Image (cartoon, grey):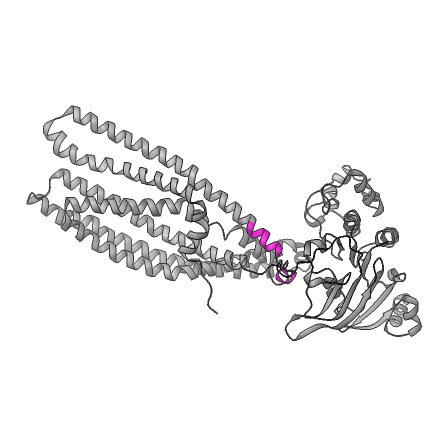
Amino acid sequence: MAEKKVSILTAFKTIIWPRRNLVFIGLLLIAISKAASFVAPMSLKYLMDDVVPNKDISFLKTLVIVVVIAFLVQAITSFLLTQVLSIQAQYLISELRAQVQKKVLSLPISFFDNTKSGSLVSRIMSDVEGVRNLIGTGLVQLVGGSITAIVSIVLLIKISPAMTLMAFAPLILFAVISLKAFKIIRPVFRERGKINAEVKGRLTETLSGVRVIKGFNAEEQESLVFEKGVDRLYKNVKKSLTATAIMTSSSIFLLGIATTAIMMGYGGYLLIIEELTIGEYLEFTFLLALMVAPIVQMSNVGSQLTEALAGLDRTEELMNMTPEADEENRTIMLENIKGDIAFNDVSFAYEEDKEVLHNIDFEVKSGSVVALVGSSGSGKSTIAGLAATFLDPQSGAITIDGQDVSKVNLNSFRKNLGVVLQDEFLFEGTIRANILFPRPDANEEDLQNAVVSAYVNEFTDLFEKGLDTLIGERGVKLSGGQRQRIAIARAILANPKILILDEATSNLDTESETLIQKSLATLTEGRTTFVIAHRLSTIRKADQILVIENGRIAEQGTHDELIVKEGRYFNLFTYQARI
């Protein structure tokens, strides 16, 4: 399928037209500025043909005053253009970044599973940068250059139609070369965006995993991977520079012919036969320079616009992705939920024709605890992900209080959801900010209750700044057990109706685990809870245990019931008991 590209017309409709009032003011300022720029070259004719031969000092004073006023007008309009268009372009960039980031967060978990975070950072921060060339400097140069070129051509024809035609022929050839070059450059710029995102993505992973890299003495290996990425980027830039160099060299040669050879040759001939005055010759020379300069400028703008549209191609591709919310179909709003959850013949596959769950059937009553056990890769986390609405089943249905979850508004569901993961994520900042994350407006009493319930105070009381201690990126300054207790305190503060605990005590020492088990007993009371556990001693009191093997429920029951059966659960439990 062909890639959809953002056209100039599309960019105009979506970016420029909604801001037409500001753009109109900008265009008016550009017109005034360009009109003022013609005063100086046109005054040369009067200077050389009238003032100097007639020694008219009075007229000379008038000319100088008019020229000075013209330059003042250009200076003022230049300042106002920066305020009106350039600043507006920067505002639009920040606005677009916010929109793209919001869109990215609305996408399903599967998108993030298949996309590097560094790549997304590049798309959010870099791809929208080209907008400044559509509203800011690019628009000023494009429109201003067009006005200058058109007016210059009219005035040049008035002075000498024949010399204008001769000067214009090389410019047409240059325009044809430029258009062909732009067609080559645009896909190169688009590919550059992809490569840049991949390289930044790998660099982000490298910096995040620096302990693993150093632990396995893999610095050289990672450096080679990064070198290959930047080499691909270099080769891409080389292509665009080659195309740009062709345009630049063409402009030097063709515009040189237009300005120098024609002006010296044919212009000199017209002076000799006295068909041109010296004043007209000088006026023609400066007007031609005024016309040529913006044409060269516009070729550079064309390259900038091509890069901008390539970035907007990628941005539009992201903005057109289907969000997980699906507001058209997810219309059921949950209020005062009980928390009865049922899986009805649910199957799921991460890849087509490769199911990881097969016909899963079970019910979890409100306020009860269901534990998911089994070997690694059996499908436990996938079931939890489905229960949390992070994933959608390929077939079958999941219900909450009898309502099909696929038709439930995600916000109304997830405000009742709390999650504690095995490798819990903490944000850079303070311990207090991380615990308050689900409820930033929670009062101090609720915060302290969560802190005490998760036994966070046992280590924060030892810190000089207590809860206001900075923990570093991903909580790197804390131990695994400390990070896990903060995560549990965060879930306690959220006060959810549905709770997902994925190996919530896996990073704790024996003493901490005992304390956390007590707090979890309080946390899970009255809440529908899914517990994923490898350590089976932690789930003996679960209301229901599901033994998952190869994506199916192999056994189901309470701890005592499964021990009596002496099946898979019995084998796992007795094996762990002997260790």
Q: Residue at x 22, y 55 (%)?
A: 170
Magenta stretch secondary structure, dominant: helix
Q: Quadrant of the C terminus?
A: bottom right
Compare residues 361 and 184 and report the one nearer the observer: 361
Q: How many marks?
A: 0
Check residue 120 for magenta coloring.
no
Left or right of residue 477, residue 278 in this image? left
Please tell me whether residue 289 is drawn above or below residue 533 in the rendered image: above
Q: Position of residue 327 (x, y in %)?
A: 62, 58
Check residue 101 for magenta coloring.
yes
Left or right of residue 192, residue 353 in this image? right
Compare residues 192 and 209 and report the one nearer the observer: 192
Q: Residue at x 10, y 30 (%)?
A: 53
Q: Which residues are magenta?
A: 99-114
* Rendered image quadrant of residue 461: top right
Please tell me whether residue 433 is drawn above or below residue 2 in the rendered image: above
Compare residues 503 and 362 and report the one nearer the observer: 362
